[in-house]
Structures are given as structure tokens and as C-alpha cells.
């Protein structure tokens, strides 16, 4: 039996810590489902994607990484930048799984589908961490989200960044 890597101290997760946690959670999800714990399986899937998305936000120096809503903002931003990674599909699937944790309404085959989608996207997002963020131009619906993530209130529609409005690249 292997033991899970130690967790970082509360509030002290690095980008690398978040990647390790994401990997661990996505590996645990199928086992939880096999044991019949549908709730934990979907919670693990949500956690795996949320940690990987937060790793991107943290690497980019985005300000507030707390909460479900911010994870959604990061997912939307990355989906807009990475048209070759199904970030939006993975977010919708994982978010449905998150709701299942509270409502217990999904069947094992539905959960297997969620696990498959997220398990495919998490490694792709991990690879993207080791590349510079992609160029991005702010459109009408993007302004509030990009301002929220970056903390730059002077951004305007039409502003462009060669590094996805990262604060660190």
C-alpha cells in the first residue's frame, strides 16, 4: 500500500502542490466509485479540476483564488485561451459532479463519464502550466472577469496581452 504525499500546510499550497493534489484526487475518483461511494467520487473529480485551475491562477499571479465562483472564472478564461483543451466541458462536468455531492442524483455511468472527461483534461492543463499563457484580447463579455482575476481595473475592451493577462509572465 502506498501512502499519499503529505499535504502542504493550510494556506501554503504552491503551484506544484496543487498539481500533486489534483493528480491524487483524479486517481482516487474511480476507486471511490468502485467502492460505491458516488458522492466521494464526484467530490474528488471536482477537487482535481479545481486544484489544477487554481494552479493556473496562482502561476499567473491572479489575485483571489478562493471559492467556487473564482474557479469558474479561471475555467472560462482558460477555455477562451486554450481552444485545443476542453476546459469548458471539463468544468461543466466537474461542476455537475460537485452538485451531485450535495444532491446524490447521478448514476454510476454518469459519474464514469464525468471522471473520463476530467481525467482527460487535467493532464492537458498540467502540460499547459509549463508553457507561456496564450495571447488574449478582451471582448465585451470578458472585461469584468479579466479585471476580477488580475485586479487591473483600468483594462478595457480591446486590450490585448501576449500572455493571457498574467500578472507574472
Image (cartoon, rainbow, N blue to C red):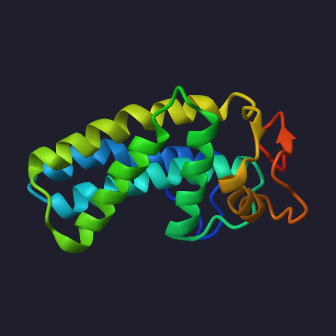
- Which image quadrant: the C terminus? top right
Q: Is residue 78 left or right of residue 113?
A: right
Residue at x 48%, y 55% (from the top left corner): 50
Residue at the outermost bottom position: 102
Q: Is residue 117 visible?
A: yes
Q: Residue furthest front?
A: 140
Residue 102, position in %: x, y?
25, 73
Quadrant where the image shows the N terminus: top left
Q: Position of residue 71 (x, y in %)?
A: 54, 59
Q: Residue at x 43, y 35 (%)?
A: 121
Task: State the image coordinates of residue 93 (x, y, percent, origin top left).
Answer: 33, 49
* Snapshot quadrant of residue 98: bottom left
User: Which of the 4 image quadrants contains residue 81?
Assistant: top right
48 on left or right of 137: left
Q: Residue furthest right?
A: 154
Looking at the picture, how far across and down is residue 123, in whole percent?
A: 47, 32
Nearer to us in this view, 75 or 11: 75
Instruction: Please report the residue visible at 76 percent of the width from the left and 47 percent of the height from the top.
Output: 138
Instruction: Please indicate, yes or no, whether residue 5 appears anywhere in the rendered image.
Output: no
In this picture, residue 18 sits left or right of residue 140: left
Amino acid at each position: 500500500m502506498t501512502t499519499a504525499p503529505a499535504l502542504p500546510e493550510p494556506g501554503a499550497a504552491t503551484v506544484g502542490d496543487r498539481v500533486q493534489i489534483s493528480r491524487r484526487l483524479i486517481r482516487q475518483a474511480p476507486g471511490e466509485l468502485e467502492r460505491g461511494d458516488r458522492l466521494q467520487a464526484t467530490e474528488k473529480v471536482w477537487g482535481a479540476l479545481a486544484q489544477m485551475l487554481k494552479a493556473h491562477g496562482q502561476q499567473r499571479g491572479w489575485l483571489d483564488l478562493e471559492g467556487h465562483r473564482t474557479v469558474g472564472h479561471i475555467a472560462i478564461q482558460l477555455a477562451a485561451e486554450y481552444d485545443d483543451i476542453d476546459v469548458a466541458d471539463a468544468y461543466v462536468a466537474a461542476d455537475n459532479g460537485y452538485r451531485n455531492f450535495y444532491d446524490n442524483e447521478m448514476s454510476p455511468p454518469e459519474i464514469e463519464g464525468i471522471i473520463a472527461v476530467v481525467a482527460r483534461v487535467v493532464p492537458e492543463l498540467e502540460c499547459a502550466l509549463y508553457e507561456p499563457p496564450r495571447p488574449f484580447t478582451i471582448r465585451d463579455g470578458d472585461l469584468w472577469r479579466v479585471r476580477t482575476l488580475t485586479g487591473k481595473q483600468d483594462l478595457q475592451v480591446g486590450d490585448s496581452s501576449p500572455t493571457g493577462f498574467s500578472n507574472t509572465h
